[in-house]
Amino acid sequence: MLRFVAWRLAGLVPVLGIVLVATFLATYALPGDPVLVMLSDHSSNVEMANRLRAEYGLDQPLWKQFFNYIAGVAVGDFGMSYRYVRIPVVEVLSDGIKISPILALAALAAAASIGVGAGILAAIKRNSGIDTAIILILVAGLSIPNFAFATFFVYLFSIKLGALPVAGWGRIDQAILPVAILAIPSAAYIARLTRTFMLEVLGQDYIRTARAKGLAERVVIARHALRNILVPLLTSMGIIFGGLISGTFVVETIFNIPGLGRLAIDSVFARDYPVAMAIVMLFTAFFVLINLAVDVAYAIIDPRIRQRMGVK
Amino acid sequence: MTAATQTTRYPIDGWRLVLRRLARQRNVLIGGAIVLFVVFVAVIGPSLMMHSPEETDLFNPWSPPTAQNPLGTDKLGRDILSRLVYGARVSLLVAGAVLAITLTVAAILGMIAGYMGGRIDAFLMRFVDIMLAFPEVVIAILIASMIGSGVLTVIISLALVWWPGVTRLTRSFVLVIREELYIDAAIVAGTPTWAIFLRHLLPNIAAPLLVRASVGVGFIVMAEATLSFLGLGIQEPVPSWGGMIRDGLPALRTDPYLAIFGSLALGITIIGFNLLGDGLRDALDPKLQGR
Amino acid sequence: MRVLAKAFAGFLMLAAVATAADAKTLRINVTGDPAMLDPITYSELVAGRVLRNVYEGFTDFTPDGKIVNVLAESWTALPGEHGFRFNLRKNVKFHSGRAFTAKDVKYTLEQLAAPDTKAGIGAGYVARIVGIEDVKSGKTKELSGVKIVDDHTIEIRFTKPDVLFPIYPIWFMDSGIVADKGADWVRTVSAGTGPFKFKEWRRGAFVEIDANKEYWGNKAKIDGVRFLVIPNGDTALAQYEAGELDVLDVQESTIRRVMRDASKEKERQVVPRAQSRFLAMNPQVYAPFKDKRVREAISLTINRDGMIRGFYDNAAFQLHGITTPGVAGYFNDLPKPKYDPEAAKKLLAEAGFPGGRGLPPIDISSTAVFKDELTYYANELNRTLGMQVNVNVVERATFIRAMNAGEVAFFPWGWTSGYPDAMYYLEQMWHSKSPYNRGRWFNAKYDALIDEATATVDDAKRFQLYRQAEMVYIDDVGAAPLPMVASIALVKPNVTGARATPFGFDRFVFAEIK
């Protein structure tokens, strides 16, 4: 098992390496001089420019800058922000890093419970009106972008009914709409997967046996069917998290939540590359680790797969 | 799963089975009709419009639907219908470009991985595994930081997101074909590898690959709209559905037409592509029948 | 699943712990994080919004543009010299508790001149003080033109006349703050004398200031002000409607909605903005702009009434030339720019470009705020004049740098006044020596008139010189004047004393929440 994890971890190195090089190039080999951008109105002041350039290490040869960058990233130091001059990137990120994971996890919890529930319901009530209705909602949930949903929800719940706040972050009621919007595509995706695998499982012999033994349908579903759909759901976690991360950007922008997603978009527009790139690195590392965790969990759950994946 | 378990999986009355197949047919038909219509609009539409999508009219902003502007106008008095129609072209061109790049890259890498096997295969697939479903916005931010927002950023980002899945698909096709007798024959005859790729592998995987890849068009359209919505994608004055929805959202209460028609166009198009895509996948993949 | 449940529970707890803003804290929106929070490097609007409540200068101005004495009790011109003697207010304390004295005035002026502090707007105000070059070059730290007479008297001498010096908003800071709190002081405290002091800055979320209980003047009636960072104007409006903001600084993208909503009439404040707007045509980058006829043709092509109606639902004012209503030296009887597409076509043909033929393609660029306008100009210039104009939206900091460097050919921009005298616009925007002459329109006659005005103490005479200079600019089409968008605010009925002014919001000293 350890070897398996180690092998997988080694496999992450090229990905992180590529992202590292790409973020470095994006940060340091851009058209235009970041120092001049930072100086704004004072860009003609050579002395100031040189000072700042030295402070940011931009006066060193490229290979040395790259080395410094990697050395910094290795210990969690992403340099200093361009927009907030002389403030470390880590400090700029410090608030957002507490927000986005909470948002994503809350949405995941909501999506998982709703998605699995709806999927099972659709599978059990197969070909009925309920099934059709659920499928229709699924198609809509997967097809209509969440920014379109957001408008409708904000209009209805915040402006028309006045039940929920429009934006912001910090109180529980401010989290309801963003979490709901963020959860929609994932819930639809999970429901679709659940329905598909549920149908497959329900057709298996052991379920028929269980049914034939006269077990209650509820017990059959809970004890046998549900356990078996966990594996395929688990393997889809990578995709689900990918969707959640993308959704974070949209939702944080719409609801003005000071998380990493909004910060990343703002930073791109403000050309604060060190911050934007640090967030790209963070999301990459997170995403890659999620995939690793999925792989490991998968191998633990299903020994056959471990075999196939070349683990002895 | 084998065909045997297939038929015995779940008790279904005969007539319901027929109905279900018909229903599936209906989905494909609806999806196909929507897609055909969108393609038609994108190709022919712009030349039929009364207004240019970029023509401003400051004395006619946020007009409700009229004879002059059948779907109303936006903040600059531009005709929403013209912009929607032109936006369809933009969306499809982006999707087409992404597909073309993706298919080319995926065909090459997939054939290499599937045919060569061994370490190359292992390495490529490991990489594909990790890149798979990597959030497009994160990649777009990386690209936008380097070359700025715009059409090119969207195309590169989405291609980067899509190639891994298609590569894996290609590889799975190649794995099957590699076992065919005629490949062995070609190898024995001393045909160079590149010729095997071109003459035997490519022609056999091209058609199914194309169809399967087009399943993803709906998601590409959605991803493009999302990036444009965030401001990382298509830039003014070129119309894009995502950008139109972004501009329309704030005015939803007083002037809802832009947001509503934009969302409708986008939603219906994606639903059309998804229905068609799902139907095609089901038809092509007997293993998935009944799901 | 259990992990998720735990995460969700943690989230609930976190949400419960986070407290709502205090009822007596005034909540208002700003478009972004301030770029800085100290009075030396201060150079942008959001920072100004906050700092105006925290720091004070010799004088301040009322919402209708009248000058009032603040930290200067009085001043007199030095006889026979260029300069002033200021008598400073006594019994004024900094937020640190230290007394405000002449030493702090000198320190602030020297900081604004120092070579390593990256001074902002304030650097321009100290440019005429004797000895400034020696400080700037690092030769000395002491400004020889500033003389401390006693703790509450200071003399400041200039190399050239600078009659407006007492009204420059130079915000004085505590000279002991660095020794006390270190070079990073700005992250934890404020060093002013104002009615509010710094409390907290949560990047991307808000900046909060607290009422200064020790304030020397009228103390604030509220506990504090929270400036919420809301980049999107529509989100801000929605938050105001949902009662999450007490005061809304209405952004341009929502003006139409706010103006059309009859239910908001009572909460609405519409005042002209002290902002000069123009479409710059840089002759150094795009040669055809050297010809006055080309510049005039472009100006004639812009339908300003259409813009005022279509874009801003009549909440905009057409400027005559450079100056804006609400500043001293504004004349409302100067000729207004015309809209005449036919005349424009003829002028362009006379200049040698009939139907736009022979004109190289050009980018019209600006920041995202101007996106709609850019799109309109590009389309209109193409339709009427046959010019090939591409829209180019650029990030703000990059764009400002490029404008200052004179690299941008064709752009709409606005210049917001820092004090209520037309000199601010006239000198900074279009004097050939100004670092902010971004359109690079140079005119010797204009320069001479401004130079003369700078040295003219008599207001009436000075304003006549302003008038002549502005006419030179209008006649030569230095740039195409654009409609100035009104400053619009919404204030909840339970809030009094919060006033929008041409220069942003009045200090929140009089604001009250019922």
Image (tube, grey):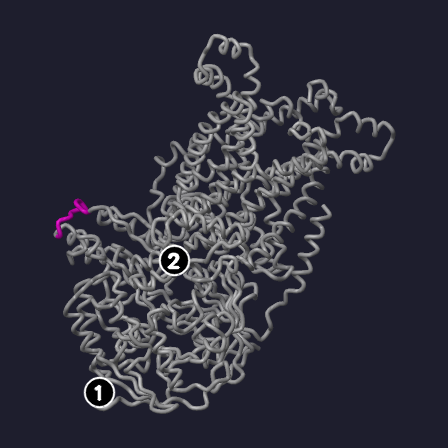
Cα distance between the residues tagged 2 and 1: 46 Å
Residue that extends furthest to the right in the rendered view of this protein: A214
Foreground label between 2 and 1: 1
Q: In this view, does C343 lie to the left or right of B62?
A: left
- Chain at numbered mark 2: C
Prevailing secondary structure of the magenta residues: loop
Q: Which of A245 and A54 is in front in this view?
A: A54
Q: Describe the element under mark 2 as helix, strand or loop.
A: helix
Residue C190 point in image, percent of width and height:
48, 75
Q: Which of marks 2 and 1 is nearer the N terminus?
A: 1
Q: Pointer 1: what residue?
A: C81
Residue C66 horizontal/vertical position (percent) = 35, 82
Number of numbered labels in the structure image: 2
Q: Mark 2 points at which residue?
A: C369
Residue A41 in view here: yes
- Left or right of residue A258: residue C329: left
Q: Are marks 2 and 1 in contact (CB under 8 Å)?
A: no
* Residue A8 is inside the magenta segment: no
> Picture quarter containing residue B26?
top right
Question: In this picture, is A100 found above or below C501?
Answer: above
Residue C406 relative to residue B94: left or right: left
Magenta stretch bounds: C351-359
State the image coordinates of residue C500 (x, y, percent, origin top left): 43, 73
Q: Which amino acid does label 2 sit on?
A: Val
Q: Say which amino acid is labelled 1.
A: Glu
